[in-house]
Amino acid sequence: MRKLIASILLAISLINITFAETNLADLSEQSLPVNIPNQQDISIANSLPTTSANEVQASEKDFATEKNLAALQQEPNLLTAQRGFDQDLSIWSMYQHADMVVKAVMLGLIVASIITWALFFSKGIEMIGAYRQLQKEQQKLSKVKSLDDAIGIAATFKKNSVTRKLYDEVVAEKTLSAGSHDLNGTKDRASFRLERAVASISRYMGRGNGYLATIGAISPFIGLFGTVWGIMNSFIGIAHSQTTNLAVVAPGIAEALLATAIGLVAAIPAVVIYNLFARMINTYRGQLGDVAAQATVLLGRDLDLADSNKKR
């Protein structure tokens, strides 16, 4: 009985499958009509050129090559439109295409560098001349034994001679204290006047050093500001181009590094020249101190000799 039921179910399933296949065949015949080519269509088809598989692949390769070349040609144009740079990345080209803020930073640093070198040449020549002149005057006064002899020799020096100025201070104090019997007070006042004169001359020789110190201190930070601004522009260029290609980032970084380089060019010489002038001024101040000490000694000797002669 079980075998009979199984046979019946199997027969029913086979009938259903056959019926379904028949329906699908009928539907396909209705939806896709078959066009039988006539003799004219066959002749036209035979007259058309045939395309092989190799020719199709070759045409696809040519199309891909042309597409890559077009992309390479468009990339420099995109870079130029976004960053304003062409293939020339020289210093002048980077300055011309830089942002206004970066240009202002560069110009300010260039002006600072010009001021530094102008001070170096002008002040350097002045200090060397003053140093040599003071040495010559010291040699002429090295063997004097009285204040009057020193004043006579100093009178032959130039009008702008610092040695002459120091001895004029001593003469002025001696004249004002002529009626005083306090010799120590006269010496102290003369010494004080000489100290003030030495300080005044030293300040005069040190003028301009403040500019050098300022340039040496702030130029690196100004260059760093240009660096930060250039990097900001680089990131903006990346955001606009929607690419991380190094060619898009390079111009902004080049601007940043150029601003930093100019800042260092302005700062390093300024610091070196400032230290050089500081040492020269200290040496010059020491020479002035020697002249002032000699004038004080000569004044004290003359006052003591004059007082001794009065007591006799």
Image (spheres, grey):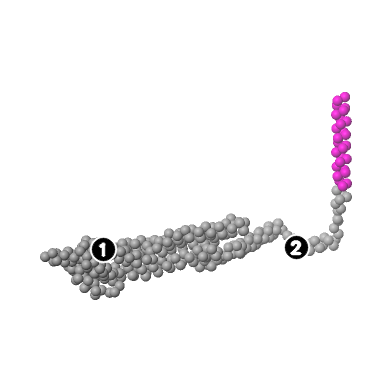
Identity of the amino acid at label 1? Arg
Which quarter of the rendered picture does the C terminus lie within?
A: bottom left
Q: Where is residue 64 in the image (x, y as percent from the top left)?
A: 65, 59
Point out the frontmost of discs 2 and 1: 1
Q: Residue at x 52, y 65 (%)?
A: 103
Mark 2 to mark 1: distance in Å? 120 Å
Q: Where is residue 94 in the image (x, y as percent from the top left)?
A: 52, 65
Q: Which residue is drawn at 55% across and 57% down?
A: 232
Give yes or no for residue 8 being in the magenta stretch: yes
Q: Is the magenta stretch mostly helix, strand or loop?
A: helix
Q: Where is residue 166 in the image (x, y as percent from the top left)?
A: 27, 68
Pointer 2 local density, CA inside 10 Å: few below 14, some 14–19, many at least 20: few
Pointer 1 local density, CA inside 10 Å: few below 14, some 14–19, many at least 20: some
Identity of the amino acid at label 2? Pro
Q: Residue at x 81, y 63 (%)?
A: 44
In the image, 111 versus 151, the foreground residue is 151
Could you tell me which secondary element the residue under label 2 belongs to?
loop
Residue that mark 1 sits on: 189
Query: Magenta segment range?
Result: 1-27
**Contact flag, marks 2 and 1 (Cβ < 8 Å):** no
Q: Which residue is drawn at 40% across and 61% down?
A: 213
Residue that mark 2 sits on: 49
